[in-house]
């Protein structure tokens, strides 16, 4: 039953979340508030404002609408986001770019169980479920975090401090990498890193054909909604028939795995052209609504109860950076790949391209494509990280 709150009707709660998301973007578009939203992006507001409303007693901590939104909207959004991905372009980035991206992902996956091992005395029960979800976020992004969190049943109260860690630790690391860009040439020369691959990437980018966006038409929108919700529902139904594997892979986890696989297959079909009409933007609107519904389930006071997550997050970033630095040394990869590979994982599509453009102004698409790769593998890698964390935790 929903908690006693000012708003309890499921339809009213859903409308309140949607209106809240709309107001966030309306305010973010105002020039006077540009500085505020630059430091605290809309995705952070989308999570924390509903959480504040729940803490203040405006929204309930539990409601059937929260589950409905996640189980029906998330698969549909994943279909839209993944099937419009230009996977062939990712494969043309070259071995060093892909290797550095995957090295960063490996650092996140391995760092999770190490964190459990080092901090298990101070972490709350079932912390491995939260660490696995954060690992998915630090490889793919919020979409993957929510997919893994729902798949393994991460408690909503445990997500609250992890969202803070994701934002504070992640953006602190982003700032450090931006500062490091001032010394990239000196570092590359000092360690004799091969910078010729940067020129090769610029050549390869000329082969990537950028498509013009077109105004969305009613047939486009109708087909997007039909395909995303239809395929998503089919995967949700199919997931219920597949066997559960321990405490990691349940019916909804199978749903996410199926959605990711089907989306990747569809990305090689003409359906990928729906991106010209803004399919991924439609998908991200749904993601913001899902994130708001997750925020509404959490209590702000939970953030203050687990400061150990901040220390754990900082150590985790150091493990990730150490593995990336080792890969860069072995591959003789320039600092550009170290920084871009790191933020394509930790920051995803929002900061990956920014980092790439700061280091090499013409190579922002590289950061974007590497981040998209992270989004594609983030759910699987997050589930693997969760499994390893569960083994270390003895769960």
Image (tube, rainbow, N blue to C red):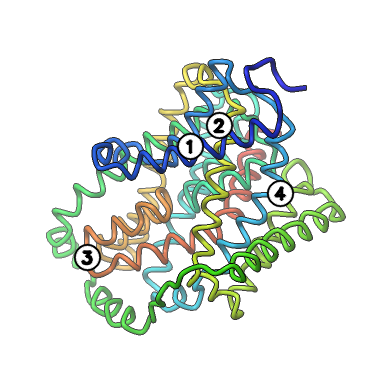
CB under 8 Å between discs 1 and 2 = yes
Q: CA distance from mark 2 to mark 4?
A: 17 Å
Image point 75% across, 40% down: which residue? 247
Q: Quadrant of the N terminus?
A: top right
Viewer-proximal residue among 27 and 310: 27
Residue 264: where, in percent of width, then height? 61, 69
Q: Earlier in the sequence, mark 2 or mark 4?
A: 4
Q: Residue furthest front?
A: 218
| Disc on the earlier residue, 4 or 3 | 4
* Mark 4 → mark 3, Cα distance in angstroms: 40 Å
Horizontal placement of 222 versus 371: left or right? right
Would you name the residue on which mark 1 appears?
A: 46
Q: Are marks 3 and 2 in contact (CB under 8 Å)?
A: no
Q: Is residue 258 above or below residue 126?
A: below
Tell me the residue that label 2 is attached to: 295
Secondary structure under tag 4 reads helix
Q: Position of residue 136 (x, y in %)?
A: 54, 48
Report which residue position mark 4 lands on. 72
Where does label 3 land, which residue?
360
Q: Under tag 2, what secondary structure?
A: helix
Label 3–label 1 contact, CB within 8 A:
no
């Amino acid at each position: 039953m929903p908690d006693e709150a000012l708003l309890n009707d499921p339809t009213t709660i859903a409308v309140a979340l949607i209106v809240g998301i709309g107001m966030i973007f309306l305010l973010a578009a105002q020039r006077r508030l540009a500085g505020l939203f630059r430091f605290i992006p809309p995705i952070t507001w989308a999570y924390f404002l509903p959480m504040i409303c729940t803490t203040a007693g405006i929204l309930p901590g539990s409601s059937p609408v929260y589950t409905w939104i996640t189980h029906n909207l998330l698969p549909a959004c994943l279909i839209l986001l993944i099937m419009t991905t230009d996977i062939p372009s990712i494969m043309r980035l070259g071995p060093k770019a892909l290797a550095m991206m995957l090295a960063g992902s490996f650092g996140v996956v391995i760092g999770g169980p190490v964190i459990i091992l080092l901090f298990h005395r101070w972490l709350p029960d079932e912390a491995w479920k939260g660490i696995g979800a954060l690992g998915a976020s630090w490889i793919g992004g919020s979409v993957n975090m929510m997919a893994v969190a729902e798949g393994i049943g991460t408690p909503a109260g445990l997500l609250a401090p992890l969202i803070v860690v994701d934002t504070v630790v992640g953006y602190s690391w982003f700032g450090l990498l931006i500062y490091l860009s001032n010394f990239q040439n000196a570092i590359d020369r000092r360690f004799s890193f091969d910078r010729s691959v940067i020129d090769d990437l610029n050549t390869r980018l000329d082969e990537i054909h950028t498509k013009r966006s077109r105004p969305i038409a009613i047939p486009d929108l109708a087909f997007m909604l039909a395909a995303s919700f239809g395929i998503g529902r089919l995967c949700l139904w199919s997931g219920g028939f597949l066997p559960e594997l321990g405490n990691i892979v349940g019916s909804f986890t199978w749903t996410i795995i199926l959605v990711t696989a089907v989306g990747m297959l569809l990305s090689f079909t003409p359906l990928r052209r729906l991106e010209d009409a803004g399919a991924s933007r439609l998908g991200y609107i749904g993601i913001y609504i899902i994130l708001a519904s997750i925020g509404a389930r959490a209590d702000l006071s939970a953030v203050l109860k687990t400061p150990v997550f901040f220390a754990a997050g900082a150590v985790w970033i150091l493990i990730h950076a150490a593995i990336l630095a080792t890969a860069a040394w072995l591959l003789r990869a320039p600092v550009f790949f170290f920084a871009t590979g790191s933020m394509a994982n930790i920051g995803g599509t929002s900061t990956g391209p920014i980092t790439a453009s700061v280091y090499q102004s013409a190579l922002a698409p590289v950061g974007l494509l590497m981040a998209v790769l992270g989004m594609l593998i983030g759910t699987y890698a997050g589930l693997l990280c969760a499994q390893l964390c569960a083994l270390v935790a003895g769960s």
